[in-house]
Image (cartoon, rainbow, N blue to C red):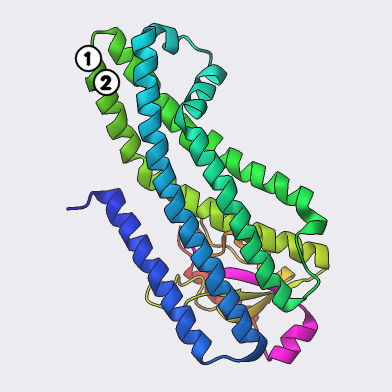
Amino acid sequence: MCDTHDTILLAEQDADQLAIEDLEKQLKNQSGDVARITKAKINELKTQIKAEKAMRSVLDKSRTRFLKTLETAVQASDPLTILSLPREQLIDFIIRGGFDLSIDEFIEQADLIMKAVEKTTRIIQPDLGLAPIQEQLDIMQTSAIETLFDDVIIPNVASGVRESLVAMTIDVPLTQAISSLSQKMQSATGRQLTEVNTKLSMFGRSVTAAIAEEAGLRYYLYTGPIDGVTRRFCRPLVDKVVSESQMKKLNNKQGLPVKTAGGGYNCRHSWSPVSEGFIKAAGLDRATTKDISKANAGAKR
């Protein structure tokens, strides 16, 4: 039987597959540029799913490698020596001890997501690209890494490490303390992966928003699945064009900006910046005031 976080992750994986299947179903009834956008969005979603799987795997490797590093360090010195490390040195020890693998993997996957987003935006406007805003994107990527690892993953590991080291100083056997730490780190996997998935998708949407800003585009097509797990917030907006002013009135009630988080945590919908000309040529529907109100009414905390 799966534990709680494994059940949640399984549900998320099922939602991923449902999202792809629904988009592929939509694609069969589309043509022209709209079909090209949907196809590119399927590629974006598949890229993100691969990134999430890669991050899950590397977090497991990081945890295993770090536990071995910690065990070796304790055997070579003593628990008090490591426990007395200043916070910054302990964090450095944790990163170099195994979690550098996860940071490197996040950077690699974020780069792949950037390329997938760029491919989508070129459908709207062929001359759009990453080059003019590369410095801005580098800063955004660094910020995503810091908020994920500095604020979520590393603090959780550090807390567990300190507890384990304290236990060792009062004669709890090394193997027992390491085993307890391993269990605590595993129990945090579900929340960490939710944060990883959200940060990756938010980063992708941030890239889209930055490209749109550079190009002066002020309208966004909301794309994604309409299936059994689609949020009531997202449903009224899917396949409709939302203006900048309308987007500012949207509230997913999860404390996350709609432009970069869509409906919230684990949302599988995304924004595609479009021009007035593209909206008319593709015959896209514009969101109404009623659609915005309906989305906000359906949002859940």
Label 2 belongs to which residue?
A: 177
- Residue at figure coordinates x 69%, y 66% from the top left: 118
Q: Quadrant of residue 78?
A: top left
Magenta residues, start to end: 267-285
Q: Is residue 82 magenta?
A: no
**Three-letter amino acid code of the residue under disc 1:** Pro
Q: Between residue 169 and residue 255, name the one nearer to us.
A: 169
When the figure is inspected, residue 265 is found, relative to residue 86, above or below; the finding is: below
Residue 131 image position (x, y, % from top left): 79, 58
Q: Between residue 27 and residue 260, name the one nearer to us.
A: 27
When the figure is inspected, residue 97 is found, relative to residue 142, above or below; the finding is: above
Residue 51 image position (x, y, % from top left): 49, 55
When the figure is inspected, residue 142 is found, relative to residue 204, above or below; the finding is: above
**Three-letter amino acid code of the residue under disc 2:** Ala
Question: Could you tell me which secondary element the residue under label 1 belongs to?
Answer: loop
> Callout 2: few (<14), some (14-19), or many (20+) C-alpha neighbours within 10 Å?
many
Tell whether label 2 touches label 1 (CB within 8 Å). yes
Residue 189 image position (x, y, % from top left): 37, 43
Residue 81 seen from this side = yes
Alpha carbon distance from label 1 to label 2:
6 Å
Residue 206 image position (x, y, % from top left): 66, 57
**Disc number for residue 173:** 1
> Callout 1: few (<14), some (14-19), or many (20+) C-alpha neighbours within 10 Å?
few
